[in-house]
Amino acid sequence: MLDLKTLLDKGVGYEDDFIKTYLGVVKDEGFLQYFPDQEKAKASLQTLIDESTEHKKTLENIIADL
């Protein structure tokens, strides 16, 4: 069970890194300006952020239930 919790903890960390590092850089550093359809790019980025946030919550719920 300890190994599973360790893997789940790593998964939470990966989701944090994905949201903060990769998606945050795209959103905050102006990379969206390079996409021809700004609204679609913003919507797609927000979808990725929302889905990653949900993945993280799911992993945290699993950890809490162990």
Image (spheres, rainbow, N blue to C red):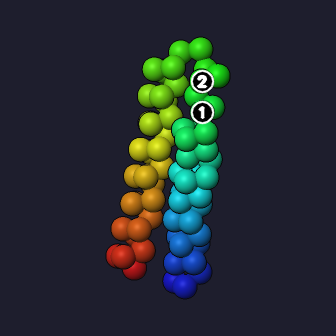
Residue 11 sits above or below residue 3 on the image: above
Rendered residue at 50%/34% (across/down)? 45
From the viewer's side, name the closer residue of 34 and 62.
34
Q: Residue furthest bottom?
A: 2
Q: Position of residue 39 (x, y in %)?
A: 45, 20
User: What type is the residue that disc 2 sits on?
Assistant: Gln
Q: Position of residue 55 (x, y in %)?
A: 45, 54
Residue 56 sits above or below residue 3 on the image: above
Rendered residue at 39%/60% (across/down)? 57
- Asked which secondary structure carries label 2, the reply is helix
Rendered residue at 55%/46% (across/down)? 24
Q: Position of residue 37 (x, y in %)?
A: 53, 15
- Asked which secondary structure carries label 1, the reply is loop
Q: Position of residue 2 (x, y in %)?
A: 55, 85
Residue 20 sits above or below residue 32 on the image: below
Q: Is residue 44 visible?
A: yes
User: What type is the residue that disc 1 sits on?
Assistant: Gly
- Mark 1 Cα-neighbour bin, 10 Å: few <14, some 14–19, many ≥20: few
Q: Report the residue marked by disc 2.
A: 33
From the viewer's side, name the closer residue of 47 and 20.
20
- Distance between the Cα atoms at labels 1 and 2? 6 Å
Q: Quadrant of the C terminus?
A: bottom left
- Mark 2 Cα-neighbour bin, 10 Å: few <14, some 14–19, many ≥20: few
From the viewer's side, name the closer residue of 36 and 16.
36
Q: Is residue 4 visible?
A: no
Q: Report the residue marked by disc 1.
A: 30
Residues at marks 1 and 2 touching, judged by CB atoms closer than 8 Å: yes
